[in-house]
Amino acid sequence: GTSAEEGGDAQAAVLPPALTPEAAATVLQEWGQVEDGFVAACEAALVKLRDLKHRTLQRSAATRSEFVALLRTPDRRPEIVAAAQRRFNAMPTALRFEEEGKAELHATVEEMQQKIWAASDEKRVMAEQMLTGFAEDGWLAQHALRLPLALPQL
């Protein structure tokens, strides 16, 4: 090896020269400024992330409320059932046991079923349109970009 390694001077050759007290104070002051800037940037990024979370939760709650309100909106189904029940009950009891009467009762029930399905399909279409509107209004895309923009600031 070299003479520095053999003589034990290897450590002395690797260590930097000692700092003067003035230089150490300057380095300490600059380090504090860098650290303060870093902490402030992290705090600002976390504020942005909390704001994004809050806005997302508000939007989710509002969207859910609108959708639930649509699903709970009264429709024609109770009226359809009531009308079919009136037709069913209007048939004389004796006629209910004859083939002709049974066929009419079955037709009444099938007609009611078709009308209920149609009413349900209308509400389903409205719900799908609302969900499509939520998906296509651009809110998610606009706010989703804020997350990757806030993260590098950490």
Image (tube, helix red, strand yellow):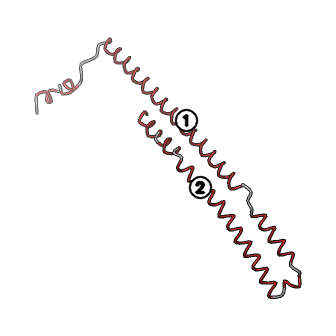
Q: Is residue 76 above or below residue 33?
A: below
Taking the image as shown, residue 72 lies to the left or right of residue 49, namely right
Position of residue 11 measured from the top left corner of the image (x, y, whole percent): 21, 26
| SS type, badge 1 | helix
Q: Closer to the camera, 29 or 149?
A: 149
Residue situated furthest top in the rendering = 22
Q: Which mark is residue 51?
A: 1
Q: Closer to the camera, 58 or 105?
A: 105
Task: Report the label total.
Answer: 2
Give the residue type at disc 2: Gln
Position of residue 78 measured from the top left corner of the image (x, y, whole percent): 78, 64
Q: Which mark is residue 4?
A: none
Q: Quadrant of residue 101?
A: bottom right
Q: Is residue 96 above or below residue 141?
A: below
Give the residue type at disc 1: Asp
Residue to which mark 2 is pinned: 129
Taking the image as shown, residue 78 lies to the left or right of residue 148, namely right
Taking the image as shown, residue 46 lies to the left or right of residue 109, namely left
